[in-house]
């Protein structure tokens, strides 16, 4: 039995397809589902909205994270994990753009994700995740995030250029 | 630049919030206030900070009224810079910033790997500078600055 966190993000779009797809996992694993705007109610513990600090704790505690293809992907990767990712589809009215599909394709080619394009295969992806994730962690590097110092310097340069002065006296 | 700027950050929940919070090493050195969409994550993450809570405009027909509100907010707060990572609320604020000649900086999300549409595209066009997190996004905007991955 694995501790599984499922998150669909904080946006206004429903993602019923993913919530329905995790339903079979509820009987075999310790699953918590953040359901967001979706009206679908899973049989496992769930909450519509989860504050950021609680979400970060849940991400750290989970054995496996199943997420939409949003910013959570990087949060999970920064924890040294490999998320299972299902992209929202514009064609299914799950989002307003193709951004998630494009992002997931990009990550699938070079990043530390397990992309699931057919949600009905989610239980299989969970069953094989430990071995698959180990291979991805070994073979695919994660780009470094910018340091605080470099970020501050970059934004200071932008500010100076836009404002033409070094700061309010 | 060791502080002294008045900065207004417009933010929503989810990835937009993460992007704007990731700029903390910079904005905490300035006189920063927020305009944020109320949500479970924004209300907790921004607790204790100066925040004006404002809902997203319910649709494009409401944008004019939203620009009017944003204009008056910027007139009161008199920021040197306006920063946002995108949200429907960003558009009226960036339009108001144009009217008040306040430079706006748009932070493009890491998940943007191709041509943006809708709100993100409009926000990027209204911004003076777009901060991008991917090298291949530099050429996608008129004036882009590569900062790298924020988190």
Image (cartoon, coloured by chain):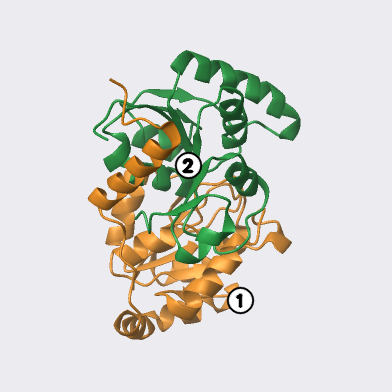
Chain colours: A orange, B green
Label 2, label 1: how far apart the Cα atoms are: 28 Å
Of residues B108 and A106, the one nearer the viewer is B108
Give x and y (percent) for residue B16.
47, 45
Circle 2 crowding by C-alpha within 10 Å: few under 14, some 14–19, many from 20: many
Give x and y (percent) for residue A113.
43, 74
Residue furthest toward the front?
A: A164
Give x and y (percent) for residue B115.
63, 60
Mark 1 = which residue? A118
Residue furthest toward the right?
A: B61
**Mark 2 or mark 1, which is nearer to you?**
2
Label 2 residue SS: loop
Q: Is residue B64 above or below residue A12?
A: above
Q: Which residue: 69% across, 60% down? A: A90
Mark 2 = which residue? B13
Of residues A2 and B141, the one nearer the viewer is B141
Label 1 residue SS: loop
Mark 2 and 1 residues: CB-CB less than 8 Å, in contact? no
Of residues A118 and A151, the one nearer the viewer is A151
Residue A87 appears in the figure: no
Q: Is residue B40 above or below residue B48?
A: below
Q: Which residue: 43% across, 43% down? A: B17
Residue A62 located left or right of residue B134 = left
């Amino acid at each position: 039995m694995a501790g599984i966190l499922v998150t669909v993000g904080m946006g206004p779009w429903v993602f019923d397809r993913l919530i329905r797809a995790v339903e079979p996992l509820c009987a075999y694993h310790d699953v918590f589902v953040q359901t967001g705007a979706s009206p679908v109610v899973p049989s496992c513990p769930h909450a519509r909205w989860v504050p950021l600090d609680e979400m970060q704790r849940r991400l750290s505690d989970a054995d496996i994270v199943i997420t939409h293809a949003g910013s959570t992907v990087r949060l999970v990767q920064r924890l040294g994990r490999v998320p299972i990712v299902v992209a929202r589809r514009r064609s299914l009215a799950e989002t307003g753009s193709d951004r998630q599909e494009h992002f997931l394709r990009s990550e699938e080619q070079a990043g530390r994700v397990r992309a699931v394009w057919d949600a009905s295969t989610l239980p299989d992806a969970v069953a094989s995740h430990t071995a698959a994730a180990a291979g991805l962690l070994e073979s695919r590097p994660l780009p470094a995030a910018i340091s605080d110092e470099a970020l501050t310097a970059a934004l200071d340069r932008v500010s100076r250029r836009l404002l033409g002065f070094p700061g309010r006296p | 630049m060791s502080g002294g700027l008045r900065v207004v950050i417009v933010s929503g929940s989810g990835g937009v919030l993460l992007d704007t919070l990731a700029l903390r090493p910079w904005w905490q050195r300035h006189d920063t206030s927020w305009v944020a969409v109320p949500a479970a994550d924004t209300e907790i993450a921004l607790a204790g900070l100066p925040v004006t809570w404002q809902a997203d405009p319910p649709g494009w027909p409401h944008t004019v009224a939203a620009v009017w509100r944003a204009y008056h907010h910027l007139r009161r707060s008199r920021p040197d810079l306006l920063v946002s990572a995108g949200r429907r609320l960003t558009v009226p604020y960036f339009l108001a910033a144009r009217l008040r000649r306040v430079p706006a900086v748009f932070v493009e999300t890491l998940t943007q790997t191709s041509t943006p549409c809708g709100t993100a595209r409009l926000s990027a066009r209204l911004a003076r500078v777009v901060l991008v997190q991917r090298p291949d996004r530099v050429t996608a905007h008129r004036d882009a600055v590569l900062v790298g991955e924020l988190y």
